[in-house]
């Protein structure tokens, strides 16, 4: 029995197509970087035309990127970009927007409440949970250090 398994495993390894690891990494780097450049451009746009400061421009920039991602996902464009870039589209905040809207689109036939509302944050819920928890821990640590340094 072991002989058959080892023969099959060697056959499988010999026939499995090689993944272009370097090519995939370059694609992910370039597309992820392009998303970040677009985000920075949006930030500069808000700072120049709407007079946001560097401290206040983050929230509208993130909201705009998520909105653009949701539109592109709804039209099926973001999925093609994600197939090309792989992890390059999942790492920036646009991956969050894609996860939310993809689940909503997938379950829309079940109705707005139980389908869209119930399943929209299943995938992204853990991101929200750990994001809020991490922010709480960082704020707690900062408060403790601020209190100790003020004594």
Image (cartoon, grey):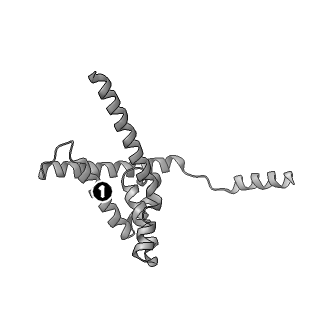
In the image, 148 versus 142, the foreground residue is 148
Measured from the top left, where is residue 125 in percent x and y?
44, 57
> Residue 121: which quarter of the image?
bottom left
The residue lying at 12 percent from left, 52 percent from top is: 49
Q: How dense is the environment of label 1, judged by Cα within 10 Å: few (below 14), some, or many (20 and up)?
A: many
Residue 33 in view? yes
Where's residue 32, x and y in %? 38, 50
Q: Answer above or below: position of 140 versus 4.
A: above
> Residue visible at 21% across and 42% down?
55
Furthest-front residue in this view:
151
Identify residue for label 1. Answer: 65
Q: Secondary structure at mark 1?
A: helix
Nearer the observer, 87 or 16: 87
Where's the N terminus, which quadrant? bottom right
Which residue is more in the foreground, 84 or 116?
116
Using residue 102 as the reference point, say whether residue 3 is left or right of it.
Answer: right
Residue drawn at point x = 40 percent, y = 39 percent: 137
Horizontal side of residue 13 vs 77, given as left or right? right
45 or 123: nearer the viewer: 123
Residue 12 place in picture, x, y as percent? 72, 56
Q: Position of residue 35 (x, y in %)?
A: 33, 52
Image quarter (top left, top right, bottom left or bottom right) of the C terminus: top left
Q: Is residue 126 left or right of residue 59?
A: right
Horizontal side of residue 50 vs 66, given as left or right? left
Please give the name of the residue rendered at 69% of the width and 57% of the height, measured from the top-left corner.
Answer: 15
């Amino acid at each position: 029995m072991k002989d058959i398994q080892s023969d099959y495993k060697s056959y499988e390894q010999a026939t499995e197509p090689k993944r272009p690891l370097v090519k995939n990494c370059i694609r992910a780097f370039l597309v992820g970087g392009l998303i970040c450049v677009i985000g920075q451009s949006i930030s500069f746009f808000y700072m120049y035309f709407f007079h946001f400061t560097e401290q206040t421009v983050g929230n509208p920039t993130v909201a705009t990127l998520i909105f653009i991602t949701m539109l592109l996902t709804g039209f099926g464009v973001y999925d093609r970009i994600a197939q090309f870039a792989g992890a390059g589209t999942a790492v920036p905040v646009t991956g969050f927007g894609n996860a939310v809207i993809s689940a909503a689109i997938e379950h829309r036939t079940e109705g707005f409440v139980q389908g869209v509302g119930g399943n929209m944050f299943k995938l992204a819920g853990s991101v929200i949970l750990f994001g809020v928890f991490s922010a709480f821990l960082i704020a707690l640590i900062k408060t403790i250090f601020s209190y100790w340094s003020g004594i």
